[in-house]
Amino acid sequence: MSFSPSISGLTGPVAALADALGTTREGAFAQLGSVFMTRLPAAPLSAPYVVGFSPDTAALLGFDAALAQDPAFAEFFSGNTTRDWPAESMPYASVYSGHQFGVWAGQLGDGRALGLGEIEHDGTRYELQLKGAGRTPYSRMGDGRAVLRSSIREYLCSEAMHHLGIPTTRALCVIGSDQAVRREEVETAAVVTRVAPSFVRFGHFEHFYSNDRVDALQALADHVIERFYPQCKESDDPYLALLETAVQSTADLLAQWQAVGFCHGVMNTDNMSILGLTIDYGPFGFMDGFDASYICNHSDSQGRYAYRMQPQIAYWNLFCLAQGLLPLLGQQHDENVRGEQAVKDAQRVLEGFKDRFAPALERLMRAKLGLQTERAGDDALVNRLFEVMQANRADFTLTFRHLARVSKHDASGDSSVRDLFLDRAACDAWLNDYRARLSEETLDDAARAVAMNRVNPKYILRNHLAETAIRRAREKDFSEVERLATVLRRPFDEQPDYEAYAALPPDWASSLEVSCSS
Ligand code: AMP
Ligand code: MG
């Protein structure tokens, strides 16, 4: 696209990226048109500066670390140049609706996010989105901004999740400013650039369903099928096939969340990706001490989104998606049975969640225990481990990581696991059962440890680590954000220089509270 003089004079990588951005490319979300979005520029952000930059995400787009060295970088990713963009390339805020905390909330939409268009690299197309770029027609009472604290958390966590092998939106950078933003306290504004193949949410479908816009609903579903799941077109009922892919990718995602002790915090239907990506990082949390009822979001007083609830909530959210798709379903059936048959079809596909989720989690848990074979008692073994962990609030991440040190022959390697449990006798009892189970495996200890260390991370984004990086960033020292991001890029590797980042949380971490305020 062509830019105004404010950046068109540039020849650096930012200008190249701007030229590569296309909102007019066929099949782009932005091409769906004005029923789906409103085009507008970002609100000005004063004196922007770079807080964090992910060279990994830049590489996805075909750029290297020189991108962030470009003097135009902060200005561009603050959104400040957008006011000069040509009308057909203007950023866009999309409209969606959703169920928040189990209640129909009506119209929501990108209240502080703006799509910039797509970049194609190595045959894959990625949409770029600024989060925190100012008010949109969907901001309701909000100011359209995001604070530095939550932007750093989103940046760090989306990159951490990706390197844990968990599907997620990515983050290219965080741009900060001294511009004040009022939350419980006065904070400062920041803008995160998110990158994903698509930001379409369950709530987008619910929106057009609830507004009785079957034409738009179909256009949206066709867009997702065409771009991401063309194989659905082979099915008798392509829209049912789309629902089925969402059921499967969501079930797989939830199994992965549960297996690393990740809690999303706000699993509203507008925060659920149609592609099964982790999206909208707010009051998320990785568990420290294991507690199945762990609630990471201080605003979630009922515990609707507690750790143990997440799979059920995902299933509930998929029902909302299915309802949204209903008008499109069953077109292959006879007119007079179509409605009834479509409901039956949807119910059957939704039932598939359980058939997908449970085995997926079992597979992950077996790998976490270093078991290559399947035995009837494996489930019970896992459940008893969780019971002992729960009773002792044993650290989720370290317990699994240290299990790799347990020997199948004797108790010589037990101590680092035992040390995480107050009730040593209960821990020993479980370890003896585990050892008995390991003796049925052919792998030797060393090979098993290697396999386990590839699936049990040593480094996760613990709340206190993020908090330390945020506190320094508020003092304008961004080095800890980058250091932490670097550590989290290799979550499964031993990193001797960064041992402290794998340690149990300090006492002060227990008083940290994370809420919906972001
Ligand atoms: P969330 O639960 O953070 O995903 O946000 C739910 C809805 O509120 C979405 O429509 C967001 O765009 C909107 N929203 C959240 N924070 C703000 C804000 N500061 N300004 C405008 N809209 C916001
Ligand atoms: Mg959201």
Image: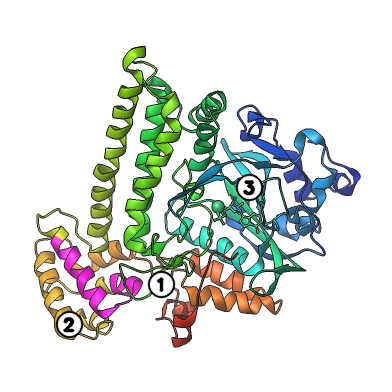
Disc number for residue 110:
3
Q: Quadrant of residue 52?
A: bottom right
Q: Is residue 123 visible in this depiction of the protein?
A: yes
Closer to the eye: label 3 or 1: 3
Queried whether the magenta region covers residue 87, the answer comes back as no
Label 3: how many Cα within 10 Å (few below 14, some 14–19, many 20+): many
Q: Position of residue 335 (x, y in %)?
A: 36, 13
Q: Check disc 2 and report the residue beneath it.
A: 412
Magenta-highlighted residues: 380-401
Q: Which mark is residue 494?
A: 1
Quarter holding the C terminus is: bottom right
What's the residue at 54%, 71% (across, down)? 484
Q: Classify the position of ligand 1 by quadrant: top left, top right, bottom left or bottom right.
A: bottom right
Residue at 23% across, 48% down = 359
Q: Residues within 10 Å of mark 2 (few under 14, many from 20)?
A: few
Name the amino acid type tagged 3.
Answer: Asp
Question: Where residue 474 is drawn, which disc sits there?
Answer: none
Q: Amino acid at mark 2?
A: Ser
Q: Is residue 290 left or right of residue 483?
A: left
Q: Quadrant of residue 44?
A: bottom right
N-terminal label among 3 and 1: 3
Sequence-wise, which precedes: disc 1 or disc 2?
Answer: 2
